[in-house]
Image: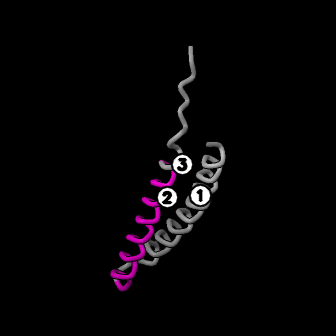
Amino acid sequence: MTNNDNRSDNARKIQSVIEDTKRRMHEAELYKTEHAAELHPDEKRALIEKKRNRELSIDALEREREEEERER
């Protein structure tokens, strides 16, 4: 049985995930800004933590994308 591991578009797919994650970060920041007076402190903390997690994800995804580009 042959291995059909076609990774030629992995870098493009990873870049798409990065862009989607950045878009969600931006939307969350807008939400936080527009509703700052209404947000419960726990909700603010959750938004801050989600942003940090997304930043870490983006860093990891960018490294993975660079590796995929090198391997092509």
Left/right placement of residue 68 relative to residue 20 reads right
- Residue shown at 58%/55% (left/top)? 61
Give how far across and how far down residue 71 sits, in percent: 65, 43
- Residue shown at 52%/63% (left/top)? 54
Crowd rating for badge 1 (residues with CA inside 10 Å; few <14, some 14–19, many 20+): some
Left/right placement of residue 26 relative to residue 45 reads left
Crowd rating for badge 2 (residues with CA inside 10 Å; few <14, some 14–19, many 20+): many
Magenta run includes residue 15: yes
The quarter of the picture where the C terminus appears is top right
Left/right placement of residue 7 relative to residue 27 reads right
Give how far across and how far down residue 69 sits, in percent: 61, 49
Is 41 placed above or below 19 here? below
What span is colored magenta in the figure?
13-37
Where does label 3 land, which residue?
A: 11
Is 70 placed above or below 29 here? above
Q: Amino acid at mark 1?
A: Glu
Where does label 2 land, which residue?
A: 18
The quarter of the picture where the N terminus appears is top right
First in sequence: mark 2 or mark 1? 2
For the residue pair 32 and 15, the one nearer the viewer reads as: 15
For the residue pair 9 and 38, the one nearer the viewer reads as: 9
Is 37 placed above or below 40 here? below
Q: Could you tell me which secondary element the residue under label 3 belongs to?
A: helix
Chief SS of the magenta region: helix
First in sequence: mark 3 or mark 2? 3
Where does label 1 land, which residue?
A: 62
Q: Amino acid at mark 2?
A: Ile
Is 60 placed above or below 26 here? above
- Residue shown at 38%/70% (left/top)? 27
For the residue pair 25 and 20, the one nearer the viewer reads as: 20
Give how far across and how far down residue 66 sits, in percent: 62, 53
